[in-house]
Amino acid sequence: MNSQEIRQRFLKFFQEQGHKAVPSSSLVPTDPSVLLTTAGMQQFKPYFVGQKDPLADFGSKNTVSVQKSFRTSDIDEVGDETHLTFFEMLGNFSFGGYFKKEAIHYGYEFITKEMGLTIDYVSVFEGDSEVPADTESEEIWRSLGITKIERFGRKDNFWGPTGAEGPCGPTTEIYVNGVEVWNIVFNEYYMKPDKTLEPLKQKGVDTGMGLDRLAVMVQGKKNVFETDLLEPILKILPESMDSRHKRIIADHLRASVFLLADGVMPSNKDRGYILRRLLRRAFTYEHIYKFSPQTGESLIIEVIKKYGDFYPELQNQKNNIIDIYFGEWQGFKSALERGLKVLEKENSIDAEKAFNFYETYGLPYDIIKEIAGVKAESLTLEGFDEEFKKHQEISRAGAEKKFGGHGMVEGDLTALDAAEMKVKTGLHTVTHLLNAALHKVLGEEVSQRGSDITAERTRFDFVFNRKLTDEEIKKVEDLVNEAISANYPVKIETMPLEDAKKSGALYFYKGNFPEMVKVYSFGPSADSGSPFSREICGGPHVSSTGEIVGKFRIIKEESSSAGIRRIRATVE
Ligand code: SER
């Protein structure tokens, strides 16, 4: 059974039991307290805590998904037989629908009947001073003929929460061939930031089963790198290569493809830094083995081929992904060469020196640790992180100030008060006009990678691999100013995402579009077929471009990271 069949059978099995299949959410979560999506339950947090109504949104209290997930905690372990950074999580969920009996029965049936596997044993929560032992699950397992039942504590059989607070509860886990395959969580509590537990009003079920790991068992393989998910990717690398290094490249490039497709850009902060680390580690091995960057490109293409049918964002973003991969490689290769040479001459590397290498040459911690070998024996990740934190304190202080104030939220915008909202709304529309003008002047390969609007200016990032000429900047400015003078009315349409894409609307994919999206067009009303600007967006916008008062001007055009240009513009 190949992995695509496993995904389909999982979805079908639960759909037949009245679950609504919900697409994977983006690896970039909406919850600001978490950097990346680590579990299937994350997108459902509001339903577990009763903030949102599953019946209204899904027509059912029960859902099923195949979720793109990423865990940084395992990054340094990758290369052995079990650890991965990116993986897919199969999960079924219930928000006040069913509870322990059904969840355990479903798990049992799917594993033994649908997948034809034998359950070795299961585990349940043993109980502690706050949460009672889960004897109910134990009984249910026994009624199914499972007699080998282990009891574990908080560390092993209690989940959550993701982020600073959230739903959590005891778990029961299914083991096959001595390995945990499925984690079933009974969300009965809400953990507050001070770690105290409050009973949830409504009980919920959250389950998670890693597809790679399940595929190992179903396909009778020895490890996660031998299944049909990763084997074709590893095969591209020469047989003689060290298998640990091969696995690192395959895992890291697969993860990078998924992060890039969800709009993460390599940078020195947060998830951008995680992505950069993955790419640079892959580049380092490519360099050591004297591969050309085209080898990595072939792996990326294979990942897109392998996963593109199930995750169409990979296909849609294919050119961007490859462009950014090469851009990042361009930016890193000479520093890597120099850095490796200097590193060779060092006698010993402590945390401070390692951080200097990172700052000067961009060499990530794990590369320094690995390449320096015995010379870096005393170097630890904690030590390196300490140095890293010292340098980040200043920028963090700035960020807190920015988010500290109260404010209002409308569509995609936040503002301190109505007056600021008005200014930002104008600049938001200007950002659409700018995006449209860039497409007209530079060609269709321009692709947005981000934007940021303050009361003073808009900032717009897009894929383009050279500096704009003065003439191009002037043309873009003129086009935007003409669109403002023409006083184009807005046309707002709500339509299915696919129709919106087909209609030629521009969009910036952050991986979180709902099924029905809003499309904002600005142009002569008679000309709705080909307006000046047409874009998928959450708003808000002005009702006609004449409301934008002033002259549009590009005040800065620069490179923001490899292969990406950044424009700052004002209306004054
Ligand atoms: N949230 C649990 C996990 O990720 C079950 O989905 O393991």
Image (cartoon, grey):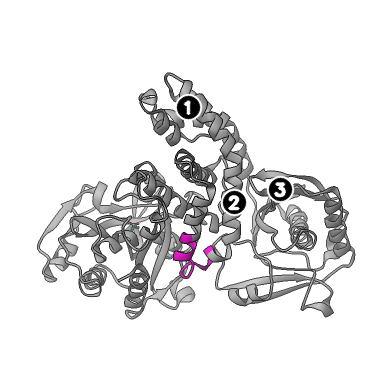
N-term mark: 3 or 2: 2
Disc 2 designates what residue? 324
Q: From the image, which quarter does the N terminus lie in?
A: bottom left
Which of the two residues, 158 or 253, is positioned nearer the viewer here?
A: 253
Q: Is residue 392 visible?
A: no
Q: On the image, numbered disc 3 is attached to which residue? A: 566
| Range covered by the magenta-colored residues | 302-314
Q: Residue under label 1, please give it.
A: 354
Ligand 1: which quarter? bottom left
Which of the 4 image quadrants contains residue 486? Answer: bottom right
Residue 514: x %, y % from top left:
55, 69
Amino acid type assigned to the residue bearing label 2 in the image? Ile
Q: Are marks 3 and 2 in contact (CB under 8 Å)?
A: no
The kind of secondary structure element at disc 3 is strand
Q: Secondary structure at mark 2?
A: helix
* The stretch drawn in magenta includes residue 70: no
310 left or right, relative to 333: left
Q: Vertically, is 85 above or below 305?
A: above
**Depth-wise, is mark 1 or mark 2 nearer the camera?**
2
Q: Quadrant of residue 494?
A: bottom right
